[in-house]
Amino acid sequence: MKRPPLTRIIRELSKLVPFVGPEAQERARGRPFKARLGANESLFGPSPASIRAMAAAAADTWMYADPESQELRDALARHHGVRADNVVIGEGIDGLLGLAVRAAAEPGAAVVTSDGAYPTFNFHVAAQGARLVKVPFRDDKEDLGALLDATRRHDASILYVSNPDNPMGSWWEADDILGLIAELPDGVLLLLDEAYCDTAPPSAIPPIDVSNPQVLRLRTFSKAYGLAGARIGYAVGDAELIAVFDKVRNHYGINRSGQIGALAALIDQPYLTQAVGKIGRARDRIAAIARSNGLCPLPSAANFVTIDCGADGAFARAVLDELLAQDVFARKPGVAPLDRCIRISCGRNEDLAVFESVLPAALSAAREKVHRNS
Amino acid sequence: MKRPPLTRIIRELSKLVPFVGPEAQERARGRPFKARLGANESLFGPSPASIRAMAAAAADTWMYADPESQELRDALARHHGVRADNVVIGEGIDGLLGLAVRAAAEPGAAVVTSDGAYPTFNFHVAAQGARLVKVPFRDDKEDLGALLDATRRHDASILYVSNPDNPMGSWWEADDILGLIAELPDGVLLLLDEAYCDTAPPSAIPPIDVSNPQVLRLRTFSKAYGLAGARIGYAVGDAELIAVFDKVRNHYGINRSGQIGALAALIDQPYLTQAVGKIGRARDRIAAIARSNGLCPLPSAANFVTIDCGADGAFARAVLDELLAQDVFARKPGVAPLDRCIRISCGRNEDLAVFESVLPAALSAAREKVHRNS
C-alpha cells in the first residue's frame, strides 16, 4: 500500500482556501453572526418569482438539469442581443474562471491580475501550474495601463480584469475598458469579470461585442440578482471560444432548481431594478455611517462599500476583528495598501443598523489595541 | 485581434459531449417524452422531507452554501462511521471524478477503465491529456483480473471500477472487490464508483476502510436518493487524500438548497428503504416485460435493467430508435458486445406501462428495418 503520488503541480501546491465562509467562523465562535455583511451576497434576496419557481421545482429534483441550459441560454441571449451559442453557464463565475484558466493557460505560462484582486482566480491559476503576475492597484483602482504593460512584458496568456472591481468597489468607464481591449496583444485572453456590473453606472459597462475572440465577459446571478446559493454564472463571448468550455466543463454540474430560479430572476427585471435601487441606498447609508465615525468610504459601483480606516493594515485588521467579535460578519482586503480598508456588503436597514451600532466601540477598541501594541 | 491559442491538450481535443440530455432530444423531436427512462434518475422522487427542506430553503438562496459542507459531511461521516475529514462533497460524482483525474494523473499517464464503462470519466481523462487504457467487459461484467493486469502493464496512475457497474447493471461481491484492492500496485489510485450501491445486495459492498490511501469510494444522492438535479456527490477516503480536493475544487460550487436537500434525504433512511424496494419491484417488472417480448433481461443491482435484444448492435440501435420515436426516453451501451442491449431505468408503474405498451411494436419495426437493410 503506497499513497498515490499526485501530479507534480498538485503535489507542489500548498493548501489554499480562497475564502473561509461565515459558517466556519460561526462554528469556531460558537455563535451566529447578527449581520451577514462579508460575502457581498444580496440581503434583499432574489425576486419572489424566482423563489416561487425554485420552491415549485423542488419536487422535480429527481431529474438532472438540462445540461445544455438551453432555456436559460436562450433568455440570456435575448437579454444581451447575442446568440445562445455565445453563452455558457457555469457553477458561478468561480467555476468558469477555473475552466478558462485550464483551457487557455499552459502550466508555466504567465497570467496577469491585480495584486489584491480576486483570490479565487489566483487559486485556479495556481492549480493549473501557471505563473501569476501581480500588478499593484493605483489610486485604489485596477491600473489598466500597467496591466497591459505586464501582459506584454510577460507574454501572458490571460489578463484578468474586474469592473467594477472587488475588493475596492472602484470602476472604469466603458471607454477605458474599450481602450484596454483595443490594446490587447494578439492571442491574449481577457477575462473581464463583471460580477458587479448590475449595480454600476451604465456608462461603466461597454456593449457586449462577441466578434472579438479575445474577450470573455463574465456575469453572475449571485450579486444584484440575489441568487448566490444557486451557483449560476455565465460567460458571453465569441461562439468558437464559448464552445471550448464544452471540452472541459462538468456538463451535468448545474443544479436544476438553481437554473430555473435564475431564469425566473432574469425575466423579473422590474425586481432587479428595485433591488439595485435598494443597494444604491444601502451604499449611501454605509458611507454615511463611515463618515459619521470619522472614516472615509470609497466610491463604489458594487454591492458593497470599502471603507478606508485611515491607518495601516494592522489597524483595519483590528477594526475587523472587533466587528467580528461583535457579531458582524465582514471582510477586508488582504494586500497593502488596500488592506487599510474594511469591506461592508450592502444590506437591509436592520443589517446596517447592527453595523452602525457596533462600529464606534469597534473603532475605540481597535485604537486602544493598536496603541497598546505600539 | 487574434484568437487565443488555448493549451495544447485542449486544442487537440475533439469536442466531446458525454451524454446528450433528454431535453435536447425533445427540442429536436419537437415533442416531449412520455416516459423518462434513459438517465437512471429515480422516478420515485426524493424523500418528501427533502422536498420540503429544499422548498423552504428557496427564499434563502441569496446566501452561498457553506463551502465546507460541514453539516452534510458530519452527517455522512456518522452514516459511514468515518470522520468528516474523510468526506468531500462535489457537484455529483462527475465533478469529483474530474478533480481526481486532475490531481492524480499527469498528462500522458495511463488511466485504466473498462471499454464501454462511464463516458464522463473518459471525458475527464481526455481533458487532462492522460492516456485511456480500455479493458473489455467479460461476461457482461467489468473484468477485475484483466483490469489489474492492464494497470500493472501500463504502470497506470488511476484505475476506474464501478460496482454495480453502468451500463450493464452487473456487480461483484465485496470479497472480489477486496481482492482487487489487496492486489492494487503501489501508488495506483482506485476510483471505486459506487453510484448504484444503494440498490445493490449488501453483500456486494465492502466496508469502507479509510486507512487505505489508494482507494476513493464515490457515492451520490442522484440515484436511489432521487436527487439527480441537486448535484450532490461525495467521496470517502483517507483524510490526506480527501484534503487534496481542497487544492482543486470549486469551493463555492455547491448549490445551497441542494446541500440542504441531500442532508434531509440522508436523514430519512426509511424513505430510502422504501424507494429501494420500489426500485427492486420495478427491476422485476422491466425484466418481466422483456421476457414476455422474447428478450433477455440481465441481472441488475442498479436502478435500471439492461436488456439483451438478442442480436447485434444495429438491431438494438433500431429498437432504441423505435422506443424514442414512440416517446420513451431510453439509452443503450455504445461498445460491442455490450451494444446488443438497451438500458431501461426503473420507473413508476405508469412509466413502465408506457414502455410495455410500445415495446412489441418497436421490436417488430426494428426487425423489419434490419431485415430490409440486410
Image (spheres, coloured by chain):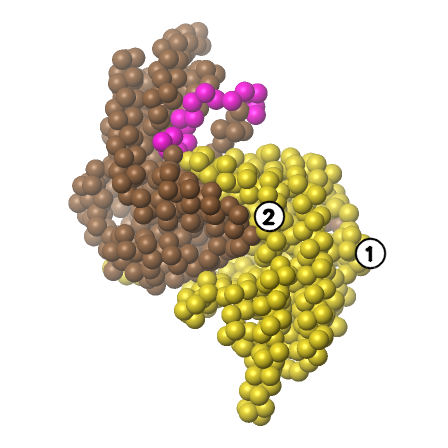
Chain colours: A brown, B yellow
Residue B175's disc is 1
Residue at figure coordinates x 53%, y 48% from the top left: A59
Q: A206 or A54, which lies in front?
A: A54
Residue type, mark 1 in image: Asp
Q: Earlier in the sequence, mark 1 or mark 2?
A: 2
Residue A173 rendering spot, x and y as whole percentages? 19, 40
Residue type, mark 2 in image: Pro
Is residue A352 found left or right of B68 in the rendered image? left
In terms of secondary structure, what is the magenta stretch mainly?
loop
Disc 2 target residue: B46
- For the record, the magenta segment spans A27-44
Q: Is residue A60 above or below residue B140?
A: above
- Residue A31 belongs to magenta span: yes
Is residue A106 found left or right of A64 in the rendered image? left
Q: Chain of mark 2?
A: B
Q: Is residue A298 above or below residue A175?
A: above
